[in-house]
Image (cartoon, helix red, strand yellow):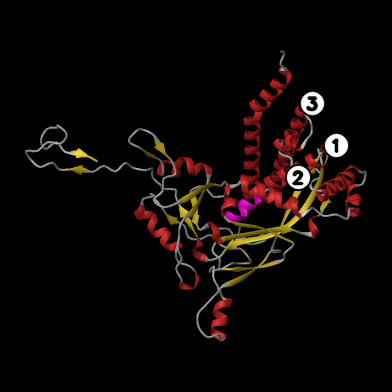
Amino acid sequence: MKHSTKGIGLQFFAMKNLDAVQQQRTEILQRMTDAVQANDQEKFMQAFGDLADAIGQSILGDVQALQALQAAQDNSILAARGCRVLTSEERQYYDAIIGAMKSDDPKQALTNVNKVLPETVIDAVFEDLITNHPLLAEINFQNTGALVKILLSTTGGGAKWGPIDKKITEELSANFIELDLTLAALTAFLPVNRYMLDLGPAWLDRYVRELLSEALAVELETGIIAGNGKDAPIGMMKKLTGAVDGVYADKTAVAVTDLTPAAYGPLLATLSKGPNGKHRPVVKVLLAVNPEDYFTKVFPATTVRAADGTYSKDVFPFPTTVVQSAAVPAGKAVMGLPAKYFMGLGTQSGGKIEYSDEYKFLERQRIYAIFLYGYGRAMDENAFILLDISGLKGAALEVKVTEIPAGESAGGTASGAGETE
């Protein structure tokens, strides 16, 4: 019985190149993050165009592999390749979008498309974001849909024993804040090559979801960690008061040189102080740190060796989830209560995809845009602490010397030799 080596060869080629593709994406996303932090719009869009090319080529490679293997295009095969089984509404939407994008005047054609991006597509993007980006999975990250404003409880409770009077009403009202989700607009650009349109609705859906997820993640993480509040979220690093011209300043960094219980305890005590002088239980915390600092500072400080010679990493004196984020400045870290950071994101203009006249230097594709709005902030001042970890030292093995009384021996050793624990 003969076996086809062509199919095996294609699969081996795909596996062999998986690491290279992932490394390429990581390098591009780092360039995007660097451009955001440097406020260099041109470099960001150049990197974004490279990301679009990389995703497009990856998807095209999958399509070609499927065609070469003559695999049936059933739901299970598509799902294995990252495609979803589209609803009838989603398929109708993508068919209409593909038709408009193929026209000679896509701007006018898209204007005539009386359909908006289905909510289920945005839901899928949020699922991808949370699955692939640990920081977004930890915080209170919500799809707000078409909401413009949202009311949040800062204390987690709004009840009070006693007679109802004006004073109690004022106290209860003080436990809520109203967030205007239109304070920060987020434009996601979609460079689309014409060949992508010929692949059909399911593949276009995968492309839109992947590109939106990666592009949004870069901007969201930067805003959630370090946003200054001006046309952006108020980041975990920022004070919630004292804004100047809408710009919020960094918190005062607390110097941390070790992660022993004696050093960790005061930090946890700060987090336990809720608003209005109330205290709250703290059962776990988040530690966001720059990837380089993680491996050069946090990793050595939290890795211990057992008696059998094996190592255990991320060993903290209190339940702590470590998240690596390029948005955290070098030498700094953010520690806090992830559930106490709210980030809401929704679609604007009905979630329509529009033709974009911007960034015409990206001649490889036609450029489209989808406009979203959102806002984020910590629910109270003590929910997050900015740390200075530039002087963080590695974990030290504690050694105790026990005196041995004269005339006695320990484990057959000479009298008075002493031992370590």
Q: CA distance from mark 3 to mark 1?
A: 18 Å
Q: Foreground mark, 2 or 3?
A: 3
- Rendering coords of residue 318 (x, y %): 41, 52
Q: Which residue in the structure is indicated by mark 1?
A: 198
Is residue 54 found left or right of 408 in the rendered image? right
Question: Which is nearer the eye, 4 or 237?
Answer: 4
Main secondary structure found in the magenta portion = helix
Q: With respect to residue 276, does 266 lie above or below?
A: above
At x 43% / y 41%, what residue is drawn? 313
Picture mark count = 3
Vertical relation: 315 (above or below) 187: above
Is residue 223 magenta-colored?
Answer: yes
Residue closest to the far left: 407
The residue closer to the viewer here, 296 or 247, is 296
Numbered disc 1: secondary structure: loop
Residue numbers of the magenta segment: 217-225
The residue that label 2 is drawn on is: 208
Q: Nearer the viewer, mark 3 or mark 1?
A: 3
| Of pointers 1 and 2, the one earlier in the residue sequence | 1
Q: Is residue 330 magenta?
A: no
Mark 2 Cα shell of 10 Å, populated few (<14), some (14-19), many (≥20): some
Q: Residue at x 83, y 46 (%)?
A: 91
Residue type (three-letter) at the residue carrying disc 1: Asp
Label 3 secondary element: loop
